[in-house]
Image (cartoon, grey):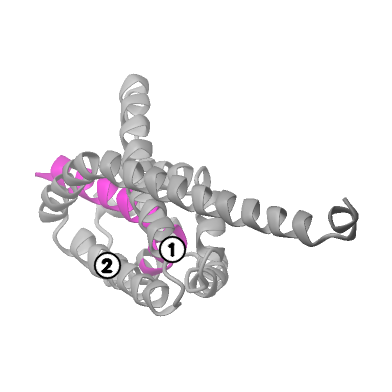
Amino acid sequence: MQILEQLGLALGLASLAGLNLYLTVFLTGMLVRFDVLHLATKYQAIEVLGHEWVLATAGVLYVIEFVADKVPWLDSAWDSLHTLIRPVGGTLLAMQALGEMPAHMEVVAALLAGGAALTTHSAKAGTRLLVNHSPEPVSNITLSIAEDITVAAGTLVMVMKPVLALCLFTIVLIVLWLVIPRLWSLIRRSFASITTKLRLLFGRTAAHYSMTSPGSSRA
C-alpha cells in the first residue's frame, strides 16, 4: 500500500505540474508547512516544498502566471516558454516524492513522470491555442480559473487519498493521450484556415494598392 501511495503522490505532482507548476509547488508546500500532510516517513522527501524560500519563489511565479494566463496570446507565449520547464519541474517533484530507488528504476520513473507532465502541459497549451481564436478574453479568464481550481482539487486528492489519485490521474492521462492528437490536428487546420484568410486579405490589399498607385494611373 505504501508504494501505491508514493506512486499516487508522484504521479499527481507530475501531472499537476504540467498544468500549473508553481501553483502545485505552492499548494503542496503550504500543506507541508502547516502540517496538513502530517508528514510520515513516506512523505519526508517532499518536506523541502514547505521551506519559506520555496514557498516565496513559487508564490511570486504563480502570481505572474496568474496574470499571464488570462491575457489572450500572452498565455500561449507563456506556455511555449514552459514547454521544457513544466515537464522538468514535474519530473523533479515526482522523483522527490518517490525517494531513493535503484538507478534503473529512477530512469524509468523520470521518463514516466516527464511524460505525464508533458501530456498535461500539451493539453493545456493546445486548448489555449484554440481558445485564443476567440476575440473575447472571457474564455481565457474562465479557463484559467478552471485550471487553478483543478490544480487545487487535484492537490487535495493527491495528498489526502494518494491511491485514489493514482487511479484518477492514470485515467486522465489515458484520456488525454487519446484526445491530444485530435486536438493538435484541429489546431493545425485552424491555423491553416487563418493563414489562408491572411494571404487572401494581404493579396487583395496589395492588388488594391497597385491599382490605385500613381504609377498604375499613368500607365
Residue 96 visible in the snapshot? no
Query: Pointer 1: residues within 10 angstroms few (<14), some, or many (20+)?
Result: some
Indicate which label's residue lies in the foreground, 1 or 2.
Answer: 1
Q: Is residue 117 above or below residue 145?
A: above
Please say whether residue 91 is one of the residues in the magenta stretch.
no
34 or 91: nearer the viewer: 91
Between the residue at mark 1 and the residue at mark 2, the CA separation in whole angstroms equals 23 Å
Residue 150 numbered tag: 2
Q: Label 1 sits on what residue type?
A: His
In the image shown, does 209 or 107 lie closer to the viewer? 209
Q: Residue furthest front?
A: 219
Q: Main secondary structure of the magenta part?
A: helix
Residue at x 25% of width, y 51% of height: 9
Q: Earlier in the sequence, mark 1 or mark 2?
A: 1
* Residue at the image point whose x is 35% and y is 64% from the top: 28
Query: Which residue is labeled 1 in the image?
Result: 133
Give the residue drawn at x 9%, y 44%.
1
Between 63 and 110, the one lying in front of the other is: 63
State the SS at label 1: loop
Q: In the structure shown, which secondary structural element does the residue marked by tag 2 occupy?
A: helix
Q: Position of residue 6 (x, y in %)?
A: 22, 46
Is residue 10 found inside the magenta-colored segment of the image? yes
In the image as oriented, which residue stretches furthest toward the top? 104
Which residue shows up at 45% across the image and 45% down it? 192
> What number is the disc on residue 96?
none
Q: Quadrant of residue 204?
A: bottom right
Pinpoint residue 52: horizontal percent, then vertical percent: 53, 69
Which range is magenta?
Answer: 1-27
Residue type at mark 2: give it.
Thr
Residue 36 visible, this orientation: yes
Mark 2 Cα shell of 10 Å, populated few (<14), some (14-19), many (≥20): some
Residue 177, given in percent of the width and then of the height, sits at 23, 39
